[in-house]
Image: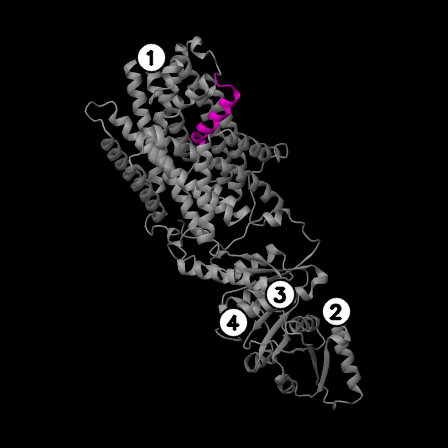
Amino acid sequence: MSADGGELERTLGFLEAMTLGGGTMIGAGIFILPGIAARNAGPASSISYAIAGLVALLAALSLSELATGMPIAGGSYHYVNRALGGLFGAIVGWGMWTGLMFASAFYMVGFGQYIVGPIPGLDGRHFVIALGLLGLALLVGVNYYGTDESTALQNWMIGTETAIVVLFVAVGLFFIDSANLTPFAPTGPTGIVATTGIVFVSFLGFEIIATVAGEIKNPSRTIPLSMILSVVSVTVLYVLVMLVSTGVVPLEVLGQSPIPVSDVAEVSMGPVGVAAIAFAAIIAAISSSNSSILAASRVIYAMGRDGLMSDWFNESHERFYTPHRAILTTGGVTALLIALGLRVDTIIALLAEAASFSFLVAYLLVHVSLVVFRQADPDEYDPSFELPSVLYPAVPVLGVVLTVVVISQMATVIVLIGSGIIGLGVVWYFAYARRRVVGEGLFREAFERTPAETYRVVVPVANPETQHGLLRLAAATAHANVERGTPELVAVNVVEAPQDTELQNIESARLDHQRELLQNARDIAAEMDVHLRTRSPVGPEISASVLDIVAQEDADQLLLGWDGAVGEDGYAFGHTIDPILGGASCDVSLVNLSRDSIGTPVALVAPGPNAPVVARRAYEFATVEGTRPTLLYVDASGVETGSDSDGADESIVREIADSAGLDTDEYDCVVVADDEVEEALMGAIEGYDTVCIGLSDRTDGSGIVYGSITRSISESAAGNVALVRGTKTGR
């Protein structure tokens, strides 16, 4: 993780991203699946790979925009979770995590097979499993130690195996027998599409680029370029490998071979070629497993960050800055799968196809998520790469259609296994994650008919004891302004992450507290029949995070809780509140709730820019308990109440009420004539539960300006106190 942002370090460049993306694709697609593909579609299996490549390319285009808009760890899981909400996030997260672990176990068993097979006397599952576990342990250790080390190893392995495969294709083209290519499509179009579903697991590599987006340098350029190039180049390579394989070796031999590429190399390149292919297959299995472990650990890390997994996973090593707990957990489960001794040709192959199903579902939801992000256009989504207008919405729409077609042709048992993984995600969400999820999806915001205007109140919540009271006041305020727009509350809880620490791990207790606060806010809003959204930023300063959200939400009012302290430690109202008061451009209400009851509010009014806002706020607060506010004005002229000036004083109050939009039957007017204004006010407010008083938005160069009356009322009033400041001029 970085030292200043609570994110993983950005250590991966273009070469690392390309090799990381190509590792899983080259390993699985070339050395394991060609025999199965040829058996199911004949020479036309090359078309199956081409179709799978097109489906992958469409997904890569959508993912490129999403990843540059939100380049943090998690990939498809994160984008679906943010766009469609926690339920779909859990489905995709579980699907990706389990799929990558099954694939990694498959690669490591293959690693053992390729070592044991050529050596006489080393036959048997025990040797295969032992070697697979040993290889896995080494890869987990490399990933635990750091991404730099794992990608350095990855670069070497991918370069070596790619060179061998290119040589295999170049030589094999001269040994193609056209008779082997007839009939070209023995199983017809249905067989071609069905085979596409089998081989699609070979294209998971490009997704890994998005999964580790939080660690990629210059993501706006590197992510789309590496994704698209890796898919296109590997697709071309796959098509050529299948044409060479089916053209060199007869279909009946190739389809039954557990090592099909080696059989082709024996014909075209002799014993040296077989040895080279065996070596390439071994390092391909290692690189594919390494990529899968890296990506799977980042998925579970991201799920822990978002509350869909335990926060225990959402911590990085204090020395290596890697998600070590997520890596160890992923490695442990993968080791169990290897230790089960599953047969490569049966169960493992079946689970690999189920992983293909899970990722097809994930990419389908990725396309939907892109449309949701485009429609909702949230402030935090600012992609540096956008699909050009000629490709949008054609890319996501075509991507969904092709994905559905491929899934529809997959074997029933595969659909059942994949559906079981989806079901696991659904059960996990409702049994564990539902009440822990902080954020909300954007689907409703994207497709519901948005009102022409919204009256939006932002409410930071931090103290469970005052949370209910603040939200009750905010809801009353929003409902009282329904003529200005549809009422909406935005509850905010900021987790403060100081910049001056080496490690920005967020403790589980703090995230749990945040989730509890925001879930309580949703429950309270449901009781009050007001729409509420939640925001859960992590930042070095609470005040800056709150101001950012106020600006992003274009808030009409900010309602803040406050402990009643004035003028302590060189601040007017505190080191967090002062910057907010100085920087917020909307109405601000600073509320100290010392009583459960709002009762009858009293607004202290006098000619001035804030007086109508104070009167309006008192009226809004009065609606909480159905009372009528009092507008209190103190005439400092010293004239006795009831004199000729009394009518003039009431006229001042009426003008203020008119400016606040209040009719005469919506408030009571009280005028006190006394040249001791402060003393008169303190006596007059004794019978009220809530006092509203205006607060200047001026500063004197050293802080917020406040008067002695504000201080006296804040410190001495027995009931609730609300300091009210109107919208700043020039907002």
Which disc, if any, is residue 475? 3
Which segment is the magenta one? 186-203
Which disc, if any, is residue 571? 4
Q: CA distance from mark 4 to mark 3?
A: 30 Å
**Residue 369's x, y, as percent?**
56, 42
Nearer the viewer's eye, disc 4 or disc 2?
2
Query: Which residue position holds label 1?
Result: 267
Upstream in the sequence, badge 2 or badge 1? 1
Q: Residues within 10 Å of mark 2 (few under 14, many from 20)?
A: some
Q: Is residue 532 above or below residue 672?
A: above
Identity of the amino acid at label 3? Ala
Task: Name the chief secondary structure element in magenta.
Answer: helix
Residue 22: in magenta span: no
Give the camera-side residue of 186 and 447: 186
Are the two marked residues, 4 and 2, in contact with CB atoms closer than 8 angstroms? no
Upstream in the sequence, badge 3 or badge 1? 1
Are the two marked residues, 4 and 1, in contact with CB atoms closer than 8 angstroms? no
Q: Residues within 10 Å of mark 1 (few under 14, many from 20)?
A: some
Nearer the viewer's eye, disc 2 or disc 1?
1
The local secondary structure at tag 2 comes to: loop
